[in-house]
Image (spheres, rainbow, N blue to C red):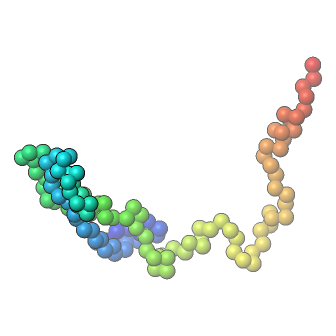
């Protein structure tokens, strides 16, 4: 199956494997008696479920939430999205003192109002 890598958005192959271990039961009592390795599928009397719907649901549950290439095979370099500057580069603003945007507000708050 081909899916889009959620990091670089390029197509990538994805092998999906899922083991279905369902047991059709008619009620909660039957579900309680099932071995732990089986999941109950509750169907009413004379109710059926198309096999294609069941397989589709199981396939969707087996897919990863965000499929991605392995880092070395992905078309993007993660370092391109890093906020830290690369070694050897000098940040021109690094020497400037950081300005606190709330400093002026603190000064105003500490001043006593005149009556």
Image point (79%, 43%), residue name:
102
Observer-nearest residue: 94 or 71? 71
Q: Quadrant of the C terminus?
A: top right
Where residue 76 sits in the image (x, y, percent)? 51, 73
Quarter of the image holding residue 93? bottom right
Image point (88%, 34%), residue name:
110
Q: In the shown orientation, is residue 40 left or right of residue 110?
A: left
Quarter of the image holding residue 81? bottom right
Q: In the shown orientation, is residue 95 left or right of residue 83?
A: right
In this rendering, is residue 41 above or below 67? above
Q: Does any portion of residue 58 appear in the rendered image?
A: no
Where residue 105 sits in the image (x, y, percent)? 81, 38
Q: Quadrant of the N terminus?
A: bottom left
Image point (55%, 75%), residue name:
77
Q: Residue furthest bottom?
A: 72
Q: Residue furthest right?
A: 114
Observer-nearest residue: 27 or 85? 27
Where residue 11 sits in the image (x, y, percent)? 37, 72
Observer-nearest residue: 6 or 32? 32
Q: In the shown orientation, is residue 76 left or right of residue 28?
A: right
């Amino acid at each position: 199956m081909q899916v889009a890598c959620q990091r670089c958005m390029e197509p990538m192959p994805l092998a999906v494997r899922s083991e279905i271990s369902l047991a059709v039961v008619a009620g909660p009592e039957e579900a309680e008696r099932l071995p732990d390795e089986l999941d109950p599928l509750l169907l009413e009397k004379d109710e059926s479920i198309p096999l294609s719907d069941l397989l589709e649901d199981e396939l969707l549950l087996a897919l990863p939430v965000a499929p991605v290439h392995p880092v070395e095979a992905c078309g993007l370099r993660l370092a391109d999205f890093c906020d830290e500057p690369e070694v050897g580069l000098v940040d021109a603003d690094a020497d400037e003192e950081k300005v606190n945007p709330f400093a002026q507000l603190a000064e105003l708050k500490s001043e006593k109002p005149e009556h």
